[in-house]
Image (tube, helix red, strand yellow):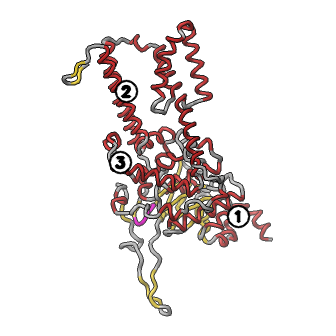
Amino acid sequence: ASLGPLVFEDPRSAYYLHLAVVLGALLLTTRFRRSRLGRALEATRDDELAAAASGVNVTTARVLAFVLSALLAGIAGSLWAHFSAYISPETFDLMATIRFVSMLLIGGAGTVLGPLVGAGLLTYLPEWLRFLEAWYMAIYGLSIVVILLFAPRGLVGLAERAIGSARNSEGERGTRDGDFGNVGKGLVPFRTVMHDRHASWTSSDATSVRRAVPAETPGGGARGPALHQDEDDGPLITPPAPLLETRSLTIAFGGLVAVDGVDLKVAPGEIRGIIGPNGSGKTTMLNLISGIYRPTGGEIILDGRRVEGASPSELVRLGIARTFQNLRLFPQMTVLDNVKVATYCRTRAGLGGIFLATGSTMAEERQVHEEATAMLGFMGLGSRAYSLPSDLSYGQRRLVEMARALATRPRLLLLDEPGAGMSRVEKERLVELVQDIHAGGEIAIIVIEHDMKLISGLCQQVTVLNYGKVIAQGTPDEVREDQAVVEAYLGRGRSHARAR
């Protein structure tokens, strides 16, 4: 092998060449893993839908993963070819495959040092255990089974988890943070978290969605406030155009119409509830607004622009964030990294800056760390930042998912049954939390819930769906007494009995 004037002829010089390549690969992969692009790849690996809903372009992440993997594999193959000078199919037999997989799993898949540790162990162990040569295959197999059962992330993964626990202990505040009882009690206020950190919503953000087109009012012309003359009270200003509007929004799955001609308007800063019986189309409605489903008819208008058909990651850039009815966290990433992923669409570091560790890239990464840490502080999860989601209670995981959605800096937050599975006390704290978010960030919020007490404590306006259609809209008290709503929940016969 040669690099310009450098020729690696003897084993010693070849060794140092290999060592330099390994150290360089470790350095670059470590920097990459701790970057916005590395987190995007890890998120895509764990849950593509949640990654897209956090602003990650999943297609780009997939291509990047293949390109970088091919780069490393190509370098390794070139070095092997010069080292071996002869390759045949028998070189990589079943035993070699099992040995490589064992190295990866025992050291730690998904870690930077894991393959190195696994390779070192399984290279030297056979020398130390020559008297067990006949049992190599059995030992490899047993090692893999034990690792998969008790340490899925390998030996390095165990070490990382222990280090994370130690760092969590250092962050303890002497209180049982991370539960709803501490929301708003001595923790970081949401107004402080978002102060001077909200994205400046410019035309470049809006035009980043290629399919977005200006929306017109039914009568034509521009949208916005208009002056009207009232004979008694003088001139009045009409309310501003809604932040979100749907017009005849429809989606059908074969012969089933899940959402049927829904018209909805959500004003900036409003908290809107959407309720209805099971199967009424509530979650499907949120899936349409967040880009997971593409409507078969109608329009979705965000801040005066049509956005139906835009991808979830594009809509996150435009200011729509969401949580899921069934939790979708990234299980192999720490709580802190789960939140950091959501800053992907607001950061710009590229491969060059990441590998060279430029000043702007490092400054951006520090800001991301500060924002994610502050968001967890607001949620009362500051001392659990380096835990894995599986180490948290159900309520804490709900908070992590909400923190991740807020880290995208949304203008519209979609909460899909945030109180599901919670006790009454936890739901009361959840109401306080959402109210604090609403007051501190001037964010419009849509909440789907079955619990009318929670809806009544949060929402100014409520929309009721049944069989995909809007059957009532109004204040919580108004819809509670609406006859169509009572029939939808209780059935016609029971509603008449209630009336009597």
Can residue 19 be spotted in the picture?
yes
333, 45: nearer the viewer: 333
Which residue is label 3 attached to?
Answer: 361
The x, y position of residue 132, in whole percent, is: 57, 8
82, 263: nearer the viewer: 82
Q: Earlier in the sequence, mark 2 or mark 1?
A: 2
The residue under label 3 is which amino acid type?
Answer: Thr
The residue under label 1 is which amino acid type?
Answer: Glu
The local secondary structure at tag 1 comes to helix
Above or below 154: residue 190 = below
Which residue is label 2 attached to?
Answer: 22
Q: Tell me which residue sits at (61%, 53%) in the image.
A: 173
Q: CA distance from mark 3 to mark 2?
A: 24 Å
Q: Quadrant of the C terminus?
A: bottom right
Boundaries of the magenta span? 299-304
Q: CA distance from mark 2 to mark 1?
A: 69 Å
For residue 487, the mark is 1
The local secondary structure at tag 2 comes to helix
Q: Quadrant of residue 446?
A: bottom right
The local secondary structure at tag 3 comes to helix
Q: Quadrant of the N terminus?
A: top left
Q: CA distance from mark 3 to mark 1?
A: 58 Å
**Mark 3 or mark 1, whichever is nearer to me:** 3
**Number of numbered discs on residues:** 3
Q: Residue furthest bottom?
A: 232
The x, y position of residue 168, in whole percent, is: 58, 45
Can residue 70 be spotted in the picture?
no
Residue 301 falls within the magenta-colored stretch = yes
